Image (cartoon, rainbow, N blue to C red):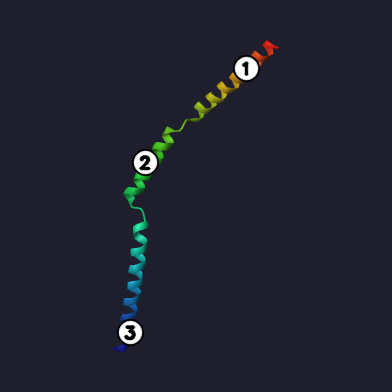
Amino acid sequence: MRDVQSGLARVETALAEIKAMLAATLPHLATRAELADLRGELRAELGEKPGKLYMWGILAVLVAAYAAGLAGLAVLK
């Protein structure tokens, strides 16, 4: 009978430790709804970023402006 009581005492202690660990850990974990919101926000942010074609267009405009500036300087000299 003492073996059973000592075994139950160990189980009770282990359960108390597990409960304390879960109580400390669970508030910091994200829920499925929070993860879905985060994914939605990330997709919205990625949708606002310019695409590759836009960036290549901007680069082409800058190179053309630089070339026009150099041509203008050559004409002035």
Distance between the alpha carbons at the discs numbered 1 and 3: 89 Å
Residue 70 coordinates in the image, percent (x, y): 65, 17
**Circle nearer the N terminus (3, 2):** 3
**Placement of 24 over or under 33, stated as above or below:** below
Q: Are marks 3 and 2 in contact (CB under 8 Å)?
A: no
- Using residue 11 as the reference point, say whether residue 57 is left or right of it: right
At numbered mark 2, what does the secondary structure look like: helix, strand or loop? helix
Question: Where residue 31 is drawn, which disc sits there?
Answer: none
CA separation in Å, label 2 and label 1 = 44 Å
Amino acid on which the number 2 mark rests in the picture:
Gly
Return the x and y of residue 54 as percentages of the image width and height.
50, 26
Question: Residue placed farthest to the bottom in the image?
Answer: 1
Q: Which residue is mark 3?
A: 6
User: Could you tell which of marks 2 and 1 lies nearer the N-terminus?
Assistant: 2
> According to the image, label 2 marks what residue?
40
**Mark 2 or mark 1: which is in front?**
1
Residue 29 at x, y percent in the picture: 37, 56
Q: Amino acid at mark 1?
A: Gly
- The residue sitting at 32% across, 72% down in the picture is 16
Q: Is residue 63 left or right of residue 40?
A: right
Would you call the spot at circle 2 few (<14 residues within 10 Å), some (14-19), or many (20 or more)? few
Numbered disc 1: secondary structure: helix
Write the residue at 38% across / 43% down: 39
Residue at image coords 36%, 71%: 17
Mark seen at residue 69: 1
What amino acid is at disc 3? Ser
